[in-house]
C-alpha cells in the first residue's frame, strides 16, 4: 500500500512528556521537532499543528472512527507521509487525514 502524502501524529500531554525525555530520534526532521515544541503544554482538543509548506489546514472529523476518541483529547501534528518511520514508535498515534489509524 502506498504511503499517504500527509499523516497526522497525535499526542496527548503525557505522550509529549515522554517524548521530551529523550525518545526523539536524532534524525527527526526539524519541522516535527518545532511542532512538538509548539504543541508541548498546550491542550490539544483535536487541533492540528501544521508546519509552513504543508497545505493541510483542517480535516473532516468523524466521531465514528475508533481513533477519534483518542485524537479528540490530543493535538495532531501534520507530517509528510515519508516521515512516518520517524514517529511510528513514539508515544502517541498516527492516522491518515480521515482518522484511520496507520
Image (spheres, rainbow, N blue to C red):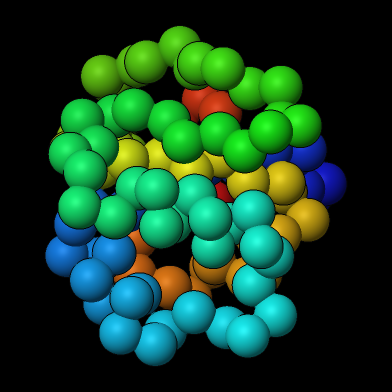
Picture coordinates of residue 87, whole percent (x, y): 54, 67
Left or right: residue 26 compared with residue 19: right
Total labels: the figure holds 0
Residue 8 or 2: which is nearer the viewer?
A: 8
Q: In this view, does 5 lie above or below 90?
A: above
Q: Is residue 24 above or below residue 65?
A: below
Picture coordinates of residue 85, whole percent (x, y): 66, 69
Q: Can residue 96 be seen in this view?
A: no
Q: Is residue 19 visible?
A: yes
* Residue under the point 23% across and 71% down: 17
Which residue lies most toward the right here?
2
Q: In this view, does 49 lie above or below 32?
A: above
* Residue under the point 24% across and 37% down: 44
Left or right: residue 61 compared with residue 72: right
Picture coordinates of residue 39, whole percent (x, y): 34, 48
* Residue under the point 49% across and 17% down: 59
Residue 54, located in which quarter of the rendered image?
top right
* Residue under the point 17% across and 39% down: 43
Left or right: residue 54 compared with residue 86: right
Left or right: residue 98 compared with residue 73: right
Which residue lies most toward the top here?
60
Picture coordinates of residue 41, whole percent (x, y): 20, 52
Amino acid at each position: 500500500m502506498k504511503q499517504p502524502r500527509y499523516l497526522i501524529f497525535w499526542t496527548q500531554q503525557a505522550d509529549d512528556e515522554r517524548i521530551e525525555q529523550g525518545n526523539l530520534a536524532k534524525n527527526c526532521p526539524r519541522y516535527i521537532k518545532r511542532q512538538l515544541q509548539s504543541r508541548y503544554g498546550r491542550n490539544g482538543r483535536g487541533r492540528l499543528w501544521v508546519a509552513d509548506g504543508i497545505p493541510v489546514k483542517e480535516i473532516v472529523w468523524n466521531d465514528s472512527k475508533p481513533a477519534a476518541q483518542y485524537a479528540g483529547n490530543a493535538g495532531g501534528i501534520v507530517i509528510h507521509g515519508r516521515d512516518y518511520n520517524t514517529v511510528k514508535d513514539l508515544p502517541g498515534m498516527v492516522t491518515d487525514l480521515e482518522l484511520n489509524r496507520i
